[in-house]
Image (cartoon, helix red, strand yellow):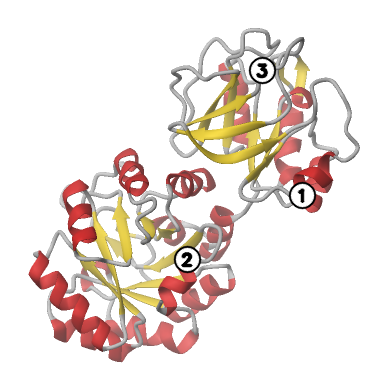
Amino acid sequence: MGRLRDALAAPGLAAIAEVKRRSPSAGDLRPDADPARLASQFANAGAAAISILVDERFGGSLDDLKAARAATAAPLLAKGFFTEELEVLKAKVAGADAVLILLRDVDDQRAAALMSYARELGLETLVEAHDGGELERALELKAELIGVNARDLSTFEIDRQTQLELVARLKGEGRVVVAESGVHSRAQGAAAELAGADAILVGSALMRAQDPAGKLQEILSRPLVKVCGLTRREDVDAAVDAGADMLGFILAEQSPRRAPEVLPVPDDRLSVAVFVGESEEAAADLVQLYRREEGRVRGRDAVLLRHGETVAHVVDLPWEEQDPLHLQRAAVVEGRLMLAGRLGPDNVREAVRAVRPWAVDAASRLEAEPGLKDHEKVRAFVAAAR
């Protein structure tokens, strides 16, 4: 494996942070961007690799790649419209570890030739697909690094749902998968992760931010925060304003926090439908499914499902009972863990330090009364969980 593949294949969600001054779809983003300074800051902020736009349509050049190479040892992806071997060679000389190949721009014969030449130079190739046909082509070309772009480069429209479907199709293929474009929040990054992406490529969101490196840290930060037991529009709005990443709606018949339905949430957050026993059709991004237990509203623990597939485990307290070993039990769970169980503003920070969960989940201790949120408690909980 090469440096880029190694960096992106590490456990957890990796990020390729992109340096670009402008975008054909959005216009000027950061005309005065200093690629050396940004590359160094992104690497220090947790980027697994740095993408440098080398095309003048994005305000970039090979000089930007050279400047970034002098400033950081992180793997560098040269991002441009490469169709000829000479362009690949120039990227190598300028300091690239990998180059982008857009299947939109080259046929299979040309793509294979570019990939072969890049290998001879010791470069990796990120082969980008936008639709199902291009994805099949990438697989036929035996691409080891596949980027799935949510943006249609002809219309510049973003279709994140199609992107996530394509990412999910690559599970089990043995490829390293990068979800490109359209990631502006922790929840959108997590959606790509749960679909099966090893990494996200983030550009515009960083370049628009007042503090680009800080924005990268925000997108990669864990735990995600879920506010559950929402029943009213105003409570959803309060949770979103507070910074919650996931909004939970309990649809179990016996729950005092039963919601009438899954209420709409912004597209930069995730909705979660909560069921007991068996799940039903629900207009939600994820399903949280608890075991049924005789004489109780629900059993103890749950799984988090995406399209019926388990993507995380929920460790909760027994219904209306204490468990002094709750945090110790949670800390040894492997894989993604969402920690629940009477969490609130006063104890979530300690729980996060003890368990290091992927997400935290709270409902009852954020209420004015069952099903009705206390907005100040919601704000305090989200702030403490960070």
Looking at the image, is mark 3 or mark 1 earlier in the sequence?
3
The correct choice, above or below, for 294 with respect to 52 in the image is: above
Residue placed under numbered mark 1 in the picture = 331
Quarter where residue 323 is shown: top right
Q: Secondary structure at mark 3?
A: loop
Residue type at mark 1 is Ala
Mark 3, Cα crowd under 10 Å, few <14 / some 14-19 / many 20+, is some
Q: Residue at x 19, y 61 (%)?
A: 140
Q: Nearer the viewer, mark 3 or mark 1?
A: 3
Q: Residue 196 vs residue 104: left or right?
A: right
Residue placed under numbered mark 3 in the picture = 292
- At which x and y percent is residue 103? 17, 61
Looking at the image, is mark 1 or mark 2 earlier in the sequence?
2
Q: Nearer the viewer, mark 2 or mark 3?
A: 3
Q: Residue 60 vs residue 349: left or right?
A: left
Cβ–Cβ under 8 Å for marks 3 and 1: no
- At which x and y percent is residue 246? 57, 35
Residue type at mark 3 is Arg
What whole-number distance in Å separates the C-alpha atoms at marks 1 and 2? Answer: 24 Å
Looking at the image, is mark 2 or mark 3 earlier in the sequence?
2
Q: Secondary structure at mark 2?
A: loop
What whole-number distance in Å separates the C-alpha atoms at marks 2 and 3? Answer: 37 Å
Quarter where residue 362 is shown: top right
Residue placed under numbered mark 2 in the picture = 9
Between residues 220 and 116, which one lies in front from this camera angle? 116
Between residues 75 and 170, which one lies in front from this camera angle? 170
Q: Residue at x 27, y 50 (%)?
A: 151
Q: Would residue 33 be seen by someone viewing this image from the given angle?
A: no
